[in-house]
Amino acid sequence: MFRRSCCLSALLLLFIVTGGCIMQKAALREGRGMWVVRFQLNSPPALDQVVDDARQEKFNLLFVQVNGRSDAYYRSPFVPRAESLAEQPDSFDPLDYVLQRGHDAGLQIHAWLNALYAWPYPPPYPLSPQHVVNSHPEWLIWDDEGRTLSQYTQNERVRESSEGLYLDPANPLVRDYILRVCREIVQEYDVDGIHLDFIRYPGSRWGYNQIPVETFIQRWGVDPRLLSVWVRNPTPEKFIEGKLPLHLRWQYYYYSLWAEQKSGYITALVKDIRREVKSIRRGVIISAAVFPDPQVAYYLKGQDWHTWMEQGYLDLLVPMTYHGDPHRVMAEMAEAKKRAQGRLVYAGLGAWIKAPYEIAEEVEGLKGIGMDGFTYFSYQGMKECDEEYLKQVSCLLHRDRVTPPRLREGDPAPLQTTTDGAELLLRSLKRQFFSLEDYQNLLNRLGMTEDTLRERLRQEAATFERITQELYARAVPSSEQTVLLPRSVEVQVISRAAHPQDAPQTRQEVYLTLQEAYARLRKGDDFVRVAKQYAQWGGATTDKVFLQDGWNHTAIISALKEGNFTPVLEVPSGYAIYKIIKFHPAEQRVYGKLPVWLKRVAFQERLARLIGHRK
C-alpha cells in the first residue's frame, strides 16, 4: 500500500494530460503547515532546505521539533543538548537558526515539544547524566502493575504499544519541569507558538503511579488497579442502556471516575502551560497535536481536548487524522470543528502514507466544512516518499500564497469543577461518545432528557457507593486467603483494524479479507501461515483470556474445543479470528502470591459473587 501510494508516475502523467495544476480559488486565510521532525535540525544546510521548500511551495507555518526526547535543539541550562548535534559546533543553535531563516521567508515557526515522552525504549539510554531519564527515573510513568517500561522483558516489550518512556503527569515535579521547558523557550526565543505533542498517557493501562492511585483510593475508597480490563474500552451506550451486569456497572462507574481523574492531570498541565506562556508573551500561539477520535483521546489517552477548547486553554487544535479513509477523516474533523467553540482547527494529515492526490481529496472535502488549515506529517516523510511530493501538493492545493487565520481573542473561561460522583460520571459518559450527536441521539431513542439521565445516574451512584461501603472490603482478599481463578483460555488471533467511522465499504473490505483467511483455515491451511498473509501486522498474536463477564465473545469461545477456531468476529478495533490453543481449568491460588493482574481477576470473581448474593 505504501509503495503504491508513493508511486506517482500515473499521477504525473495525469498532470501532463490535463495541463498541470488544478485551478482553484485560494482561501484568503488558511493555515498551511508541516511537521519538521528533529532529524532535519542537525545542520544548517538541512534547515536551509526545509525553509526553502516551505517558502517555494507556499506553506506558511512549520512545527519544528526542538524537544523530541527530553533533549534540546536549542540552548538550555537544564535540558541536555541533543546527541545528534554532537558533530556540530557548540555555536550551532537549530532553533535560533530556523527562526531567523523562517521569519525572513515569511513563515511562522512553532516550537514543537514532546511534552511527556522522554525517551524511546529499549535502550541505549541517554548519554547525559543530566537527562531526565537518568537524573529522575522516579518520574517515569507506571503501568497497572507498578512497573515502568524499562522493567519489561523483551517479550513484554514486543506486546506493548507504548512508544517509549513517559513522564507521569500527576507528579507536580514533572509538571514544573515541563513548565520550565516552555518558559525558557518563550523567554529566550521569538517563537510564534508552542506546539504540544505527546501531551497524553501512552494508554489505558498507564498512569498508576503512587500519587494518583492513593488520591483515588482516598477519595472513592476503591483501588483502580483492581477494576476489570473489560471496562477500559468506552461503551457508554451499554452503560446508559443498562446492558451491563451490576458488578460490571459498579466497575464502569469507578473506571469512569478514574478516567476523569487522569484526564484532569493532563488538562491542568495544558492550563498551566497556557498561563505560563501567555504571562511572558501573550501573542504566542498554544496548540496541541491530539488523537482525533474523542473517545480514544479522552478514555484511553487522557486527552480531554473538548475541555481544552471549550475553556480556551488552546488557541489551535491539530487532530492527527493520519489514518483511515476520507469518510473517517471527514467525520473526525467535523466533530473537532463542532467541539472547538469557534477556535482554530487544522487537520493533521498523514502525507507520508498517502499519495498527493489522496491528500488533495481530503483537503478539498475538509474545506467544505470550514477547516481553518492543514498541516502535513511530515516534511521528511514526504521527501522520502518522493522528492517531488511537496511540489505535487503545492500544485494541487496552493495556487496562491495565503496568510494564517486570525486567532480568537479572549481569556480562558473559569472551569466548573465538582467532586460529586454522579456529576463526574455524567461528564465522563458524555466524553466517551465519539460525537455529541451520538450522545443526544441515544437519549432521544431512550426517551430521556439530560436531566432525567442525571437523576438516574445520581440514584445509581448512590447504589454503587453503598456496594463499596458494604461489599468492597469483603471482595478484596487478605494476603493469606486462597482465591479462585476462573477458567481461562490461550488463543492465537488473526486481526485487522477497522474504525467505526470508516466508510461502510472500507469496513466491508476488511471483513471480506478476514473471510478469505477463514475460508483458507476451513480448508485446513496452517493458522500461522494464514496469519502471515492476512493479519494486519504480518502474523498471529497470542493471548490468555479469563472467561469472565465483560468479554463479548466468552460464550462463543467457551463452546469450542481446543484446536477449533471462530468465524470472523467483530472486536472494538476491527475484526478477528481466534484459534483455541488450550483451555485451563479454574484453580485455587494464594492471593498474596499473585501478580497484580491475577489479583484483579480474583477480585472480579469475588465481587461478582458477593453482588449476586446481595441481589
Image (cartoon, rainbow, N blue to C red):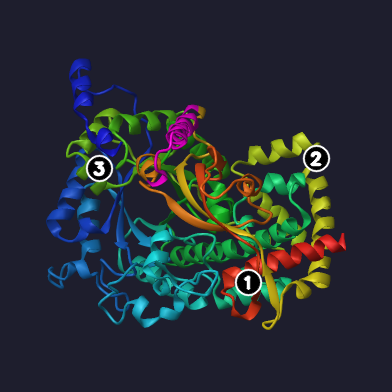
Residue 554: image location, x then y, percent: 64, 49
First reached walking from the N terminus: tag 2 or tag 3: 3
Where, by quadrant of the figure, is residue 489 drawn? Answer: bottom right
Regarding residue 309, the answer to whether it shows in the image is no
Q: Could you tell me what secondary structure mostly forms the magenta stretch?
A: helix
How many angstroms separate mark 1 from mark 2 (CA)? 39 Å
Residue carrying label 2 = 448
For label 3, the residue is 382
Q: Residue at x 53, y 68 (%)?
A: 207
Magenta span covers which residues?
A: 505-528
Decide: is 59 above or below 248.
above
CA–CA distance between discs 3 and 1? 48 Å
Q: Who's the residue at 63% across and 71% down the image?
A: 599
Mark 3 or 1, which is nearer the eye?
1
The C terminus appears in which quarter of the rendering?
Answer: bottom right
Which residue, given by chain and number where applicable, does mark 1 sit on?
Answer: 599
Q: Earlier in the sequence, mark 3 or mark 1?
A: 3
Quarter where residue 422 is shown:
bottom right
**Secondary structure at numbered mark 1:** helix
Q: Residue 553's spot in the image, x, y percent?
A: 62, 46
> 10 Å neighbourhood of mark 1: few (<14), some, or many (≥20)?
many
- The image quadrant that residue 46 belongs to is bottom left
Name the residue at 63% across, 77% down.
214
For badge 2, the amino acid type reads Met
